[in-house]
Amino acid sequence: DIQMTQSPSSLSASVGDRVTITCQTTQDINTYLNWYQQRPGKAPKLLIYDASKLETGVPSRFSGSGSGTGFIFTISSLQPEDFATYYCQQYRNLPLTFGGGTKVDIK
Amino acid sequence: QVQLQESGPGLVKPSQTLSLTCSVPSGSIRSGNHFWTWIRQPAGKRLEWVGRLFTTGSTDYNPSLKSRVTISGDTSKNQFSLELSSVTAADTAVYYCARERRWVGAFDMWGQGTMVTVSS
């Protein structure tokens, strides 16, 4: 299985801050990586697919980059509704696997 | 955002079979552009892909669960189902059904999730 490591596992930030999350994989996955947001008690929501493509309807303050084994997810200016947990997910190989999550909370 | 709907028992006894059903928008399960997927999340843990169904009836399963999992579809009811046999407390989790967009492996539509507890 391809293992996914996110860092940090949690962070505290203020509204307006720039937030960066990294995701590393144990194998080269090209750009076969997606990012999700999960609010407490809710299902995950797709934000970014294919490493850098913004899902329809998702605000442009969210972005993704990277290829191979290292990826970055960025929120350019954190908004109150962005406090949530974020997950990366690879689709290079089965089984599809997820990162451990990064919880973004209010400083 | 939530357009799928899971249903099934919230409590299952150890060694028994967990059975869940997911209802999807009319006609969608026939789509050749999507997989129909089950994902679970134990409390405080990462999401775990359980397996998926394609419109042809073909399936893929997580090897860690493969001997116990069956995913099947009913196009007449626009539903797909999960059966997980010989459950233990380790199978206690929120179970989500989701639609995977083919070619990009992205889960773009989800159910709200259903909590299943394995306990006697």
Image (tube, coloured by chain):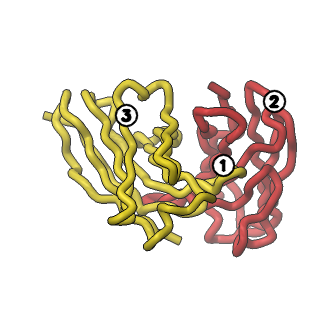
Chain colours: A red, B yellow
Q: Disc 2 marks which amino acid?
A: Asp
SS category of the residue bearing label 2: loop
Distance from the alpha carbon under mark 2 to that under mark 1: 16 Å
Query: In the image, what residue occupies the spot 50% across and 31% down?
Result: B62
* Rendered image quadrant of residue B40: top left
Q: Are marks 3 and 2 on the same chain?
A: no
Residue A71, percent from left and from top: 81, 42
Q: Label 2 lies in what chain?
A: A
**Residue with the mark numbered 1:** B105
Q: Label 1 lies in what chain?
A: B
* Callout in the foreground (2, 1): 1
Q: Dots 3 and 1: beta carbons under 8 Å?
A: no
Answer with mark 3 or mark 1, whichever residue precedes in sequence: 3
On the picture, is B88 further left or further right than B101? left
Residue A61, percent from left and from top: 80, 68
Q: Residues within 10 Å of mark 1 (few under 14, many from 20)?
A: many
Q: Residues within 10 Å of mark 3 (few under 14, many from 20)?
A: many
The answer to whether A22 is drawn above or below residue A27 in the figure is below
**Residue with the mark numbered 2:** A28
Q: Label 3 lies in what chain?
A: B
SS category of the residue bearing label 1: loop
